[in-house]
Structures are given as structure tokens and as C-alpha cells.
Amino acid sequence: LRTAVIPDFTTYKAPDSTVFTKEDMQKGTPALLMIFSPDCGHCQNVTTEIIKNIDHFKKTQIVMVTWLPFSDMTSFYTTYKIAEYPQIIMAWDPKYFFLPYYHVQMYPKLIVYDKKGKYVKEFQGNIQIEDVWKAIGTK
């Protein structure tokens, strides 16, 4: 499986375009990758649900990635006050690595990895946040 482990990647974090790679991710914690579009309604809803239920994601590294312009991403970052949630990294993917790698057909696409970096499950489109908790292993 291509997605069996988190792939090597290079992105640029909001708000300051600092480089963020797989090596910068927290070790020993589950990871949730969210490939999103700032103007997508489902993406906005899932982001709202994650924030509203952030206690379920306290020990999860969340990496939200978009390929759209950096300015669109930083606007989303500000609107949803992502800076208030240290476990969430919002990153820009100007090389379009994530879209073909994960065969994204619908937004958002969430990919869950366990604390060893092994693939668990993925979700796409209209997502029930409770299903994501179960995949991560939180209740």
C-alpha cells in the first residue's frame, strides 16, 4: 500500500511559511492528515468539528494541507484561530504532492496514522467526526 506509512514531504506552515516536513511531526503520537480546500464547505465543517471537539485530539498531531494559494490558507488559519491549537499544523503544498499521492477525489480527505506512523484508515467528503475519533483510538 502506498499509504502504509506517512510519506516524506515538504510543506510550508502558516502563518510564516516555515518549512515543515515529515521529520518535524511529533513522534509517538497518532497523526491525522487533512487535505483540504479553504473554500470547501465540508472542509469548513470538519475543521469546526475538530475545533469544537479538540479534547478528542489532544494527543494527535493534526496536519492540515492545502495546495491553494498561501494567502487563502492563511486567511483560513486566521478565521479558524488555528494558532490557538498547538497540535494543529496548517501547511501549504505548492508542489501538489498530496493530491495525487492520496488520490484525492473529494474534500476534505482525512488519513489517520497510528502512533508508529502506520496507516489506519481514511475518510473523504462528508465525514462524521466520531468515526475519526474511533480510528485514532480516542472516545
Image: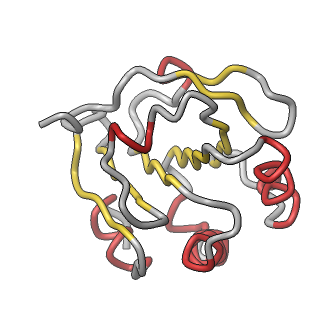
| In the image, residue 16 above or below residue 54 | above
Residue 34 position, x and y percent, is 49, 54
- Judge by depth and name the residue closer to the eye, 19 or 32: 19
| In the image, residue 52 above or below residue 47 | below
| In the image, residue 116 above or below residue 89 | above
90 relative to 32 in the view: left or right: right
32 relative to 87 in the view: left or right: left
87 relative to 123 in the view: left or right: right
- In the displayed orientation, state which residue is furthest to the left: 1
Name the quadrant of the C terminus. Answer: bottom left
Task: Name the residue at 12% across, 37% down.
Answer: 1
| In the image, residue 134 above or below residue 6 | below
- Judge by depth and name the residue closer to the eye, 46 or 75: 75
Residue 101 position, x and y percent, is 33, 37
Can you tell which quarter of the image residue 16 is in? top right
Task: Name the residue at 36% across, 61% down.
Answer: 105
